[in-house]
Image: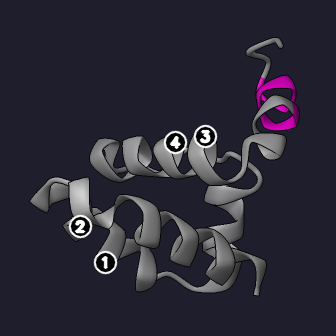
Amino acid sequence: KELDVLLERWLGRHAGAAEPHEIQCFEALLDLQDPQLARYLLAGDPHPDPAIAALIERIRRAEAPWVIAPARLRHGAGP
């Protein structure tokens, strides 16, 4: 449910300004199962596709800033 809210909120706020390739990446995210989405959006695991990874980071920064610092600490990037 939380993942749906994050994605719907980003789509509502940013879809109008998104580039076509970002919409394609967003659609690819919608094909993922919830456990995969949670790893990317909440845990900060890197997506293997650089374009999708960039979109995930945009979504995380815009819609879930509270999860960014803990994920960076886990991955050794510091505060």
Residue 58 pos. (x, y %): 48, 43
Please report contact status of discs 3 and 4: CB closer than 8 Å, yes or no: yes
User: Label 3 amino acid?
Assistant: Arg
The disc placed on residue 27 is 1
Above or below — where is 64 with respect to 29?
above
Whole-Å distance between the Cαs marked 3 and 4? 6 Å
Residue at disc 3, secondary structure = helix
Q: Give the mark nearest the N terminus, 4 or 1.
A: 1
Magenta-colored span: 70-75
User: Label 1 amino acid?
Assistant: Glu
| Residue 16, image quadrant | bottom left
Q: In this view, does 26 lie to the left or right of 53?
A: left
User: Label 2 amino acid?
Assistant: Ile
Question: Is residue 68 located in the magenta-colored stretch of the structure?
Answer: no
Q: Is residue 37 left or right of residue 51?
A: right
Between 33 and 66, the residue placed more toward the observer is 66
Residue 30 pos. (x, y %): 43, 82
In the picture of the structure, the residue carrying the numbered disc 4 is 57
The disc placed on residue 61 is 3
Quarter occupied by the N terminus: bottom right
Which residue appears farthest toward the left when viewing the image? 20
In the picture of the structure, the residue carrying the numbered disc 2 is 23
Question: Is residue 74 located in the magenta-colored stretch of the structure?
Answer: yes
State whether the magenta stretch is mostly helix, strand or loop: helix
Please report contact status of discs 1 and 2: CB closer than 8 Å, yes or no: yes
Whole-Å distance between the Cαs marked 2 and 3? 17 Å
Residue 52 pos. (x, y %): 36, 53
**Residue at screen point 62% across, 57% down:** 40
